[in-house]
Image (spheres, rainbow, N blue to C red):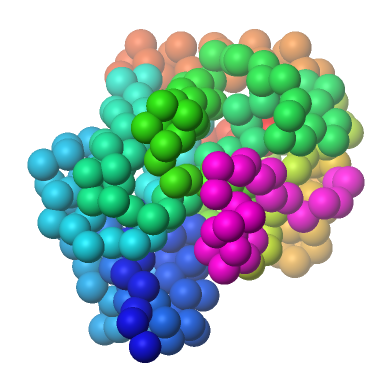
Amino acid sequence: MKKTNILITGANGFVGSKIIEALMKNKRYRIAGLVRKTSNLDFLKGSRKRIKLYFGDIRSKETLLEAFKGKDIVIHAAAFPSDWGSFDYFYETNVKGTRNVCELCLQNSVKHLVYISSVSIYGFGKRINACESSEVRKNKFPYCVTKLEGEETVRHFIDVFRLPATIVQPGQIYGPHDRTTSYKVIEALNQGLFGLCDSGRHLLSPVYIDNLVQAIVRILNKPAVSLKKTYVVTDNIRITWKEFTGHFCRILNKPMPWLNLPRQLAFLAASVSEAVYRLLMIRTPPSCYLIQGLPDR
């Protein structure tokens, strides 16, 4: 049986490593991962001997050439998923990096590109039951701005160059190995530095990592249906930040956060904190994780 050659960018990350774990169960895949030379490979300990690793940086096209040769499928999971950092770094990774991936997929006649986007491109505030056809509300957050432009880049390649691709828009991803949301929430709760906004009444759109991975596997199994399509992937539940935080508190045996601020005051506090940190050229983000309580994040 001829095997399908598949490449996962950001293979060492939360999402990439979980995708690899799932794909290894299917013997028809020959799996390769793309990581940077400085990447932490802890999440690949269980799969390292069964996959081929390429070292490269999506921001530098010339470092990617070998990785894309002979690949049938590419899952582009590499990104800079943060709420803190320079806009240039967000752009270089989430936009330029995505453009490099699209160009190399075309050059190597890749049969299916799966691009991992984000529901954050639809914007925040009073967005309930948003779907693939919902209006995009642009905002100033670098991650959201650059993920939207990255997605627009993929759509351009689909429309103009007929790139065979599928766009996946996950909600807020959580679960084991999550260093973007869950770890920060747990760390802030343990340190007593977590706060809620508007009493935590705003909704969020979470997706458990296994549910996201299952959706991606289904997309790969049905390319005739999924090509040129966009899919919003969430847990399809209605949950507030207070309820979401409450689950963590019960697991950690911690009390609910006492800090609660109105939205306007929370934005002001966050803006002042960011301004001070940037003025002092502090590279680490402010320690209080109040921002997690903002609407629809």
Foreground residue among 296 and 33: 33
Above or below, 282 against 246 in this view is above
Q: Is residue 49 left or right of residue 151?
A: left
x and y percentages locating residue 121 in the rendered image: 60, 27
For the record, the magenta segment spans: 215-239
Residue 11 among magenta residues: no
Residue placed at 37% from the left, 20% from the top?
87
Instruction: Find residue 58 and report its image quarter.
Output: top left
Foreground residue among 148 and 269: 148
Above or below, 175 against 199 in this view is below
Instruction: Find residue 263 and report its image quarter.
Output: top right
Residue placed at 49% from the left, 58% from the top?
15
Residue 238 among magenta residues: yes
Quarter of the N terminus within the rendering:
bottom left
Above or below, 270 against 220 in this view is above
Foreground residue among 294 and 145: 145
Foreground residue among 266 and 129: 129
x and y percentages locating residue 149 in the rendered image: 46, 23
Q: Work out whether residue 89 can be spotted.
A: no
Residue placed at 35% from the left, 11% from the top?
279
